[in-house]
Amino acid sequence: MRILVTGGAGFIGSHVVDAFVAAGHEVAILDNFSTGQVGNVNGAAAVHRVDLRDQPQVEQVVATFRPEMVNHHAAQSEVPKSVADPTYDAQVNIIGGLNLLKACVDHGVKKVVFSSTGGALYGEPDVVPADEDHPVRPLSPYGTSKLAFEHYLGTFRRTFGLDYTVLRYANIYGARQDFHAEEGRVIAIFASRMLEDKAVTIDGTGEQARDMLHVGDAATANLAALEKGSGGTFHISTAIAVTVNDLYRKLALLTGYRREPNYGPARKGDVYRIALDNQLARTTLGWEPRVSLEEGLSLTVDYFREQVSSPRA
Ligand SMILES: NC(=O)c1ccc[n+]([C@@H]2O[C@H](COP(=O)([O-])OP(=O)(O)OC[C@H]3O[C@@H](n4cnc5c(N)ncnc54)[C@H](O)[C@@H]3O)[C@@H](O)[C@H]2O)c1
């Protein structure tokens, strides 16, 4: 199958590209490399250095590659950035996304698989794990832009016949995650700081809990969505809430880190406890997470150990 992966030079998108290439698909990447890295790019994929906001260029990539499937990972993906500059967030995540959808309709794309968020849609959930029907009440412009794009996908399917699957990710972690970023990359930040024997600060009590999914499992969900999940919205998650203190302890053991954590102020607007039910993805996509937290953390520490000793260009 010919598949265009937007954001294919980024953290999750690059693992998805690797999985598609390994499965024998013909892959092209559309990415502006704003957070993506040349070193992440799979050599078998054609690369188009294009910004989603540049409508003629987006159109040209779709018109020339003529993908059957578009896997849409490119985004402004940082919550604090969306709070600081909601207009930029909307320009990339909504307007840029619409440039892509219009090109898909005009050039015969059959389906779009969209990487949405489970963590930023529900606010503090009423039940844990929350399922896909939980009321949505995003706290950030990022959550709102992702939700808006989900609605556009529904409209484009009803009105233009463009099929879609929405994957609402939990917190994804693993190799290639940017450990310099401030937000939401708790495992990448802890692992890299512990390996360099630097002080680690936990925001709040550390008893806040998240659903942490290894990036390898996110990649297999995207493979499943090539054939299944037409018109559906799915949590791609473990359904287990892990506390930040727990992650700290497990990573300290794996890295041989002996220092005690510093506890800082809780972050304003942070959700306290969340996990996402994944029953629908199990039954409809035939997908399930296979990488245990222990295994995933160990793989991630191995990756950051290599980065710390020989950083990427
Ligand atoms: N990391 C997570 O835990 C998580 C959770 C839920 C959803 N997501 C979603 O998954 C997707 C990938 O996230 P990630 O963590 O890999 O982030 P990332 O920043 O590594 O990847 C985003 C990619 O999009 C590219 N990009 C950004 N703006 C662009 C633009 N205007 N035009 C073209 N390309 C552009 C970047 O260069 C980068 O390669 C995003 O849509 C994000 O919202 C991520």
Image (cartoon, rainbow, N blue to C red):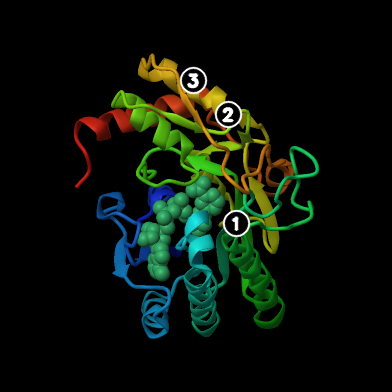
Q: Position of residue 79 (x, y in %)?
A: 52, 55
Q: Quadrant of residue 155?
A: bottom right
Compared to residue 124, the image places residue 7 above or below, namely below
Under tag 3, what secondary structure? helix
Q: Amino acid at mark 2?
A: Gly
Q: Nearer the viewer, mark 2 or mark 3?
A: 2
Q: Position of residue 217 (x, y in %)?
A: 53, 40
- For residue 206, the mark is 2
Is ligand 1 closer than 8 angstroms to the Cβ of mark 2? no
Name the residue carrying label 3.
250
Q: Amino acid at mark 3?
A: Lys
Answer whether labels 2 and 3 touch (C-beta < 8 Å). Answer: no
Q: Crowding near pointer 1: few (<14 within 10 Å), some, many (20+)?
A: few
Label 1 and label 3: CA atoms lie apart by: 37 Å
Q: Crowding near pointer 3: few (<14 within 10 Å), some, many (20+)?
A: some
Q: Nearer the viewer, mark 2 or mark 1?
A: 2
Under tag 2, what secondary structure? loop
Residue 248 shows up from this direction: yes
Residue 24 shows up from this direction: no
- For residue 227, the mark is 1
Q: Amino acid at mark 1?
A: Glu
Circle nearer the N terminus (1, 3) = 1
Is ligand 1 closer than 8 angstroms to the Cβ of mark 1? no
Residue shown at 56% from the left, 67% from the top:
112
Q: Crowding near pointer 2: few (<14 within 10 Å), some, many (20+)?
A: some
Front residue of 87 and 275: 87
Is ligand 1 closer than 8 angstroms to the Cβ of mark 3? no
